Amino acid sequence: MSKHTAYHRQTITIPVGDSFCTAWLYLPSGVQRPPVVVMGHGMGATREMRLDAYAERFAARGIASVAFTYRNFGDSGGTHRQELNVKGQLEDWEEVLAHARSRNDVDGSRIAIWGTSFGGGHAITIASRHPELAAAVAQCPFTDGLLTALRTSPGESLRLQGLFIRDLLATATRREPVCLPFAGAHGDVAIMTAPDALPGYQALVPEGGTFVNSTRARAIPRMIRYRPGRRTKKIQIPILFCVSSTDTVAPAGPTLKYAHRAPRGVVRTYAAGHFDFYTGEPFEQLVAEQSEFLAKHLSPQTPEGLR
């Protein structure tokens, strides 16, 4: 068995409120009660969009993973399909974390969290709430919705505001929700219109997989109000920030400013773009450094066959 396949994977269902999150549990072969890292993706993305690539490498270091999909997306439950709800997603994180802590096949006393993009912002928030965690990784994290929104042109802001108002009216009159794409081309009305956004999302979808490029417009003000970077100074655990210096989605300036406020933060920058982090040489560098960081703070055993 190669070092990249030394694991067993199973699909699990984790109750959250009156619904559920679906997740993959990765258990490294030859390790009894391994430490575990809880993994959440970015805006609108599901676990099939390359979370498995990271989880496989962590398993090779003797670290289990619970990689989950948020409610309302993918094969997870939720009645408000494609609705991005910051509060709801943070509830997902809390329940998945509690589930990982309660399992008998992993060591609930050795838990880390890993989030990317919008999920990287969530990882910052959760890390600030849980000083008992062993470590956290925030990859190209979303840190400040207000500062990101201020980069939007006045014309684009007005169009987004119009969609938001129409969605509220649709709810009040029980009509179909008003939606917009997560990612679009320049000139489109979408949450992200950077040149690498739409092809970046599409590159993460596995063969035969799907990505629903749509969310309700009511998500817009929620995102603007979400400023997880302001919580970094409250994080008491070791946290690794992996920052793209050329990021078109989560600007590096605010991210680095916030990251350096974390008392036990480790900050690393990469020339690769936001969506380059998931494949090729940037991925290889990132996953190797993240594996080392997690192994240092989780102290996993070496899986049998890899000694």
Image (cartoon, grey):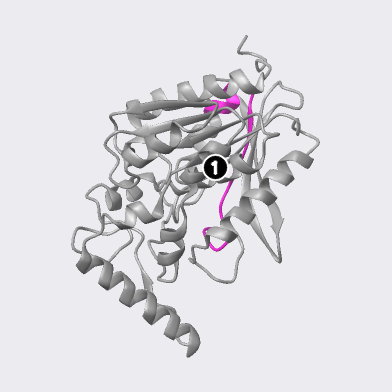
- Residue 46 is situated, as x and y percent measured from the top left of the image, at 49, 51
Residue 208: horizontal and vertical position, in percent?
Answer: 42, 51
Residue at 42% across / 31% down in the picture? 242
Quadrant occupied by the C terminus: top right
Instruction: State the extent of the magenta-drawn residues as a range.
Output: 57-74
| Dot 1 alpha-carbon crowd within 10 angstroms: few under 14, some 14 to 19, many 20 or more | many
204 or 43: nearer the eye?
43
Q: Closest to the observer: 200 or 209?
A: 200
The answer to whether 214 appears left or right of 301 in the picture is: left
Q: Above or below — where is 138 with respect to 300?
A: below
Judge from the rendering whether residue 119 lies leftward or rightward of residue 79; answer left or right: left
Which residue ends up furthest to the top in the rendered image?
307
Give the secondary structure at mark 1. helix
Q: Nearer the viewer, residue 23 or 178?
A: 178
Instruction: Report how many numbered discs are placed on residues in the image.
Output: 1
Say whether residue 303 is left or right of residue 182. right
